Amino acid sequence: MEKRRYSSQISNKGRALLLLFCLCLHYTAVQCQESKVTPPSTSRPPQFKMGLKRILISILLGVLTGLSAAILFACIVRFFVRYMRRTPILKGPVVFSPKITTKSLQSALENENQLLGSSSNGKYYRTVLDNGLTIAVKRLEAFEIGSPERHSKSVKRRIQQELEMLAGLRHRNLMSLRAYVREPDRFSLVYDYVPTGSLEDAMNRVRENELQLGWEVRLRIAVGVIKGLRYLHFECAPQILHYNLKPRNVILDAEFEPRLADCGLAKLLPNLDRATSGYSAPECFQNCRYTDKSDIFSFGMILGVLLTGRDPADPFFGEAATGGSLGRWLRHLQQAGEAREALDKSILGEEGEEDEMLMAVRIAVVCLSDMPADRPSSDELVPMLSQLHSF
């Protein structure tokens, strides 16, 4: 009995120990599962912030990479389009008139041509085509021999683009460019031949008493010149400046209707010397600026020549006490009320014409103002001169 009781006690203790051991194992397993499922609260915020930063950095890098690629692609496309659209350097004649053929023009240029005159930017020739058409050819000065080939090509392309734009100008008071020829070292320009010559030729004949030009004709010439300038300044886009307006570049037809020649050519020829012409505005020498008001100054000189009959290079202006230039002389006489003394005696006639001429002297003096802002525009001058006489 005692043995049974003792064995029974041992078995009860074993069961209790076994139950306690199982409870410990169960508790340990539950703790391990909780530790695996739910990480410690102290480690979650840093990991979350690091992940958010990585996402933001990845998005930012992606946007920058895409933007850079798009800009690079756009630049490549733009460069390719500009390369395809650039004006090719053409060889031989480029003709804009149906009356002129490439073959006849080449043949005419190879023959001996009659020299009409020369200027600081080229020489004028007269030649006849196979079909009997007489044309005037201006051969521009040759390019500098020592210039690099790349620079030479860029200059030729720029001149060619400008000439093609000038060929599209159409106005009764402009000389139309009919064709041009690119030679290895120069350009030749083709115009209509006008046998009457230039305003300079006409005024020289007037001074030598070989030609009579009345006030009505002279005023018509002045109105035609300013109408040509108005077309260049206000009706062309972009605006075109003449740069070298003087009587030699005003061509007169058989009815003395003026046409402006060499429009814009001085812009293409940086070596052109305008200082000796006497028709350039003061700002061209002071700060090398040229605007539409500089063209107006040159027009004022032409109007002064038409009114006085005198050449601006006449030694008279240097010797005159009030002089130094045609503009200063006119301004002095106009302020002194003696403008009549400046008028060409060969055109003094009826009283009405004299009043018109005195008013034209005032207009010329304003055009010859030293300050560009004080000069009127070509758009303002057209009605001012046209109202002096009915055309």
Image (tube, rainbow, N blue to C red):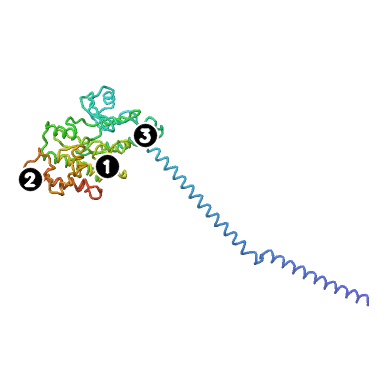
Label 2 SS: helix
State which mark lies toward you, 1 or 2.
Answer: 2
Amino acid of disc 3: Pro
Q: Disc 3 versus disc 2: distance between alpha carbons?
A: 57 Å
Q: Give whichever of discs 1 and 3 has the lower sequence position.
A: 3
Q: How many marks?
A: 3
333 or 72, nearer to the observer? 333
Amino acid of disc 2: Gly
Label 1 SS: loop
The residue that mark 2 highlights is 352
Q: Residue at x 39, y 32 (%)?
A: 147
- Quarter holding residue 112: top left
- Quarter holding residue 92: top left
- Residue 21 location in percent, x, y? 80, 69
Q: Residue at x 50, y 51 (%)?
A: 64
The answer to whether marks 3 and 2 mark residues whose Cβ atoms lie closer than 8 Å is no
The residue that mark 1 highlights is 241
The residue that mark 3 highlights is 88
